[in-house]
Amino acid sequence: MTRTIYVLNGPNLNLLGQREPEIYGHETLADVEASCRRLGAEFELDIRFHQSNAEHEIIDWIHEARTAASGIVINPGAFTHTSVAILDALNACDFPVFEVHITNVHKREAFRHHSYVSHRADGVIAGFGTEGYTMALRRLTTLIDAPQ
Ligand code: CA2
């Protein structure tokens, strides 16, 4: 089984650490990537880290992951609440999918309470800040290393 994991980030997450630190914290997306790569090195994971503001690019990476990866960690940003297309792409994946939100979306506006991606996700982490990404990677490692 491959140890390649796709870590996918949706719209506006490139602004992390630059705007609204009271909501999203001070870490940049580059910091998040560095944490994921650090953990990846520790657990011998091949991390493919991407961010896009375009829905189709995220869908294309999910399609790529179908044959290249053993899992996906995805923070779909606002597409969480709107995108049946991302849900459909994730439904075509046969490996674990973990949904991560930096904030606790359930404590926020009502329109953030529904997630299309949660219809497919094997686990959801929300409100643990950027640490949620490495938490999801640890869980994926456990699943990859579990006796088949
Ligand atoms: O809590 C999360 O991780 C979210 O996925 C973040 C999305 C939001 O639409 C979801 O409801 C919850 C927004 C990402 C935008 O990130 C920014 C970061 C800094 C400044 C502005 C936006």
Image (cartoon, rainbow, N blue to C red):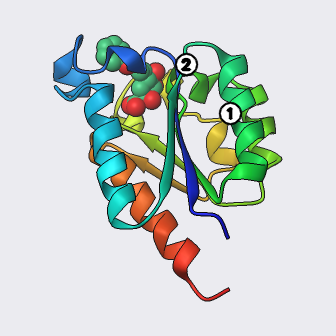
| Residue behind mark 2 | 52
Would residue 84 appear left or right of 40 to someone viewing this image?
Answer: right
Find numbered disc 1 in the image and state the secondary structure of the residue it sits on.
helix
The disc, 2 or 1, on the residue closer to the chain's N-terminal end is 2
Give the class, few, some or many, for how many residues have Cα within 10 Å of label 1's Cα (few <14, many ≥20).
some
- The residue drawn where x is 36% and y is 27% is 108
Query: In the rendered view, would you say 142 is above or below 65?
Result: below
Closer to us: 86 or 8: 8
| Ligand 1 positioned in quadrant | top left
* Disc 2 and disc 1 in contact, CB within 8 angstroms: yes
Residue 82 pos. (x, y %): 66, 21
Badge number at residue 36: none
- Residue flagged by tag 1: what amino acid is it? Trp
Q: Is residue 132 visible?
A: no
Closer to us: 108 or 137: 137
Task: Please identify the residue farthest to the bottom as the structure is shown.
Answer: 147
The span from disc 2 to disc 1 (Cα, nearest Å) is 10 Å
Residue 27 pos. (x, y %): 21, 29
Q: Quadrant of residue 17?
A: top left
Q: Quadrant of the N terminus?
A: bottom right
Residue 77 pos. (x, y %): 50, 25
- Residue flagged by tag 2: what amino acid is it? Ser
| Residue behind mark 1 | 61
Query: In the rendered view, would you say 137 is above or below 50?
Result: below
